[in-house]
Image: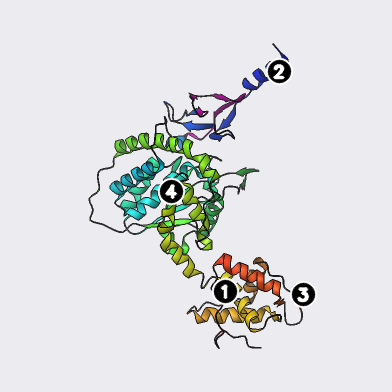
Amino acid sequence: MKPNENAVVSAVVGCPIATAGEVFADGAMIELIGGVHPSQPLLMLWDGSTEIIGPVVEYDGQLYSPALIESSILRELTLPTSCSPHGTTREFLAEICKLVTALVGVDEKAASLIARIVLCSAIVEAVSVAPALVITGPDTSRANRLLCVLRCLCRHPIRLTSVTPASLSSLASGLRYTFLIRQTAVSDKLQKLLDDASRRDQKIPSRGGLLDLFGVQVIQSDSFLSANSCPLRSIQIAMIPTNAVLPVLDESGQRRIASEFQAKLLSFRRTNLGASQRQDFDASNFSFPLKDLARSIAAATPDDPESQAEVFELLREEDAESRSARWTDLSAITVEAVLVAWKESPGEAFYISELSNLAQAILRGRGEDSNIDPGAFGKCLKALGFATEPRDAKGRKLQLSEGVHDHALRLARDLDAPAPEVSSPEVSLRR
């Protein structure tokens, strides 16, 4: 045997790499799939034309085996056991919409958004920010039913409750879970961790290593009854009581749905992950906070321009609410105060306290009673990239140069800050 052949054989028979899934540069994939026993998953290798299923698979001279996952988590995960054709993206989207509408009784818009969340769970590696579906409203029975349906439909779903930052951080890393969280309250610390976990390239330090909890999130909680408390990357679905009679959804029905749709979702993932990673959806018409959400939702239908165009209408109300909120957002108010000050006295220098007073006047003029702290205002200026002059006896000043004006105009455009109008006595600077 030649020396180079020995090297190849050595690589193939070497120690397998533990994995919950791999996507290779040439489009080949390894997927975690269900086996005969829930505690013993298998791997499915697909090279673009051929499937190989087994406890160990080999690709490009390297062996792979299923990742070590705690048995209770494996029993909870819904995994495909096969791959079957899903049709076109539009046909599969419509099929999911029809199922969700029939089983949960939501309207057409809600079903369309929910279906896109399902598809996004299959191609989540293609988005930079994973979307969240927030379920609110008093009809907890239908909300629970929606979680059951999503457990059948989404990729790597895991139902959780009584979640804390510590317990969430104890989960196996890198599985690309779809988190199905149902609990009364979500603490600020947990919400911060979920926000961190929603970013693809953001790893969380844990036990001397780096934890990857990136994945789609579905949260049913009373903590999000107000739209203002929802994460910016979220879609909110309100479950309002209805007289509609819904069909029975027992365990056997859920198993049947999961078996059919998990196989189709795997086919959808194979077909569309590469296209989703290459897509460049134009989100410029959305308000700044909604751009990431719009891109993520559009990535779910990369090969269907008609479905992508529907994203603008599906998120129209959320976009309007986002733009309305910018009228009282501190960053937007800060930029507007700089622009108003420059309009009245271009080229002059103003103390931070003067600018914060102007920002306060703008805010009060919009019916808001909250106070703007000069220190918080100064920190916001710095965070937005405005460089102040060294402190003197009265504090720090901002020189309203042409460069500062140009920077403020760019920020106003990017942040959707309201354009400064002609000054009125309520918002004029008192020099």
Q: Amino acid at mark 1?
A: Ile
Q: Is residue 58 left or right of residue 379?
A: left
Q: Nearer the viewer, residue 259 or 412?
A: 412
Query: In front here: 278 or 121?
Result: 278
Spatial separation of the CA atoms under disc 2 and disc 4: 47 Å
Asked if the residues shown at circle 2 and circle 4 are in contact, with their CB atoms under 8 angstroms apart, the answer is no
The first of marks 2 and 1 along the sequence is: 2
Q: Residue at x 62, y 67 (%)?
A: 410
Image position of 189 with respect to 369: above or below:
above
Q: Is residue 53 magenta?
A: yes
Of the two numbered discs 3 and 2 in the rendering, the one whose residue sits closer to the viewer: 2
> Residue 29, which numbered label?
none
> What SS does tag 1 mark?
helix
Q: Which stretch appears magenta?
A: 45-71
Q: Which residue is mark 4?
A: 117
Q: Amino acid at mark 4?
A: Ile
Q: Which residue position holds label 1? A: 333
Q: Residue at x 48, y 67 (%)?
A: 323
Going by the numbered disc 2, the residue's amino acid type is Asn
Q: Position of residue 264 (x, y in %)?
A: 40, 36
Image quadrant in which the N terminus is located: top right
Q: Which residue is mark 2?
A: 4
**Which secondary structure lies at badge 4?**
helix
Q: Nearer the viewer, residue 397 or 224?
A: 397
The answer to the question of whether label 3 and label 1 lie on touching residues, with beta carbons closer than 8 A, is no
